[in-house]
Image (tube, rainbow, N blue to C red):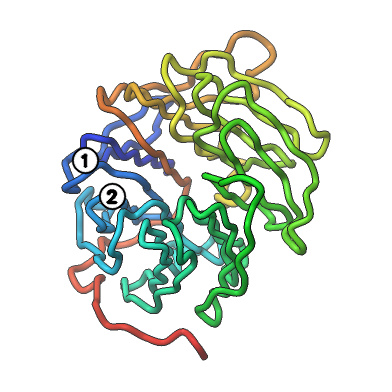
Amino acid sequence: MTTLVAGSYEKFIWGFQLKNQTLKPLFSFPSHLAPIKSVAVSGPVAVSGASDDAVKIYDLSSCSEVGSLTDHNGAVTSLSFFNPSPSLSFPRNLFSASDDGTVCIYDADPFVHLKTITAHRRGGISDLAVHPSGKLALTVGRDACLAMLNLVRGRRSFCCRLDREASIVRFDREGVRFFMSSEVKMSVHESEDARLVCEFENPKRVLCLAPGENGLLFAGGEDHNVTAWDTVAGKVAYRIEDAHLARVKGLVALGSRSNGNSAELPYLLASASSDGVIRVWDVRMVGKEKPSPLAEVNTKSRLTCLAGSSSKSSRKPLVGNSISSREQDVDS
């Protein structure tokens, strides 16, 4: 099952299932008291974070909200699940980053708060990226710094100042490299020592990134296009011109080995724009002719973020005790 979840400025959460080249609505309701800033999906569970300082949890099997996490004192700007294996039906951990400069670590089954790490002391966190190993994470903040977090010990390893403030950070599929974006600039770095490999420049500001397979990095932003950058060759691989009529606010590369069933999926890329439109593309068609979306839906809201996952696994609905306020120490 391929699921897409989007958040909006109007405080609504939207859920869709891609089936027979159609985006079938699963749910939509006002879940927060302020605009939604981030969403994440893994298997049967989704989460959203907003300017009301809360994280909301959703059970996709019952299409319902099942609880809240309120451990931050600022807007929740980034969310990320960690699942050690695509064969597992449920993620192991949830990580949330906030304008208060902290990252919260949760056990995801059930949802138990394990640790809060102060990543940035002089500014809020703009974005969070968790390494595929689940052992470390990177954050970029409004203090123009890059921080590395040791997720095993539950503490910050180091923090360094950047030449310019970055708004997005992502690891590639294997965790060998990571990407950062700052306004129109994108940089590629080795994960081992943060060495700069190459840089790209978009015509207009980049608002979202999505790592793909074979060294591709998808970027969308104020130019209304979706561009696939070849980070190995250091050039544009292909571009979907005018993918949307408004700013591209979210991208999800769905057809990948990390989803565990790439052989059954076309090479899917989902995009969302600020005018409320979500589109799914088969990128194999790009370059042959002007591509048309494989599927499309209009939420008629100002979308701010997009997340998605593809899974063959099923799981019984989450129960009420899936959320707990019990705190544990991760230093073991």
Residue 305's x, y, as percent?
Answer: 39, 39
178 w.r.t. 108: above or below: above
Name which residue lies at 54% across and 54% down. 140
Secondary element at tag 2: strand
Question: Which residue carries the number 1 mark?
Answer: 11
Residue 131: x and y in percent read: 60, 62
- Is residue 264 among the parts visible in the rendering? no
- The outermost residue toward the bottom is 332
Disc marking residue 200: none
**Label total for image:** 2
Closer to us: 256 or 303: 303
Side (left or right) of 191 relative to 40: right
Q: Quadrant where the N terminus lies?
A: top left
Q: Amino acid at mark 2?
A: Ala
Q: Quadrant of residue 106?
A: bottom left
Judge from the rendering whether residue 55 lies leftward or rightward of residue 307; answer left or right.
Answer: left
Q: Residue 199 lies in what quarter of the image?
A: top right
Q: SS for tag 1?
A: loop
Q: Amino acid at mark 1?
A: Lys
Give the residue at mark 2: 50
Q: Residues within 10 Å of mark 2 (few under 14, many from 20)?
A: many
Picture coordinates of residue 200, whole percent (x, y): 71, 33
Q: Look at the numbered discs 1 and 2 and tell me whether their residues touch, using CB distance below 8 Å.
A: yes
- From what the image shows, is residue 157 above or below residue 285? below
As drawn, 311 above or below 88:
above
Q: Give coordinates of residue 188: x percent, y percent.
A: 72, 45
Looking at marks 1 and 2 on the same chain, the residue that comes earlier in the sequence is marked by 1
Q: Residue at x 38, y 79 (%)?
A: 114
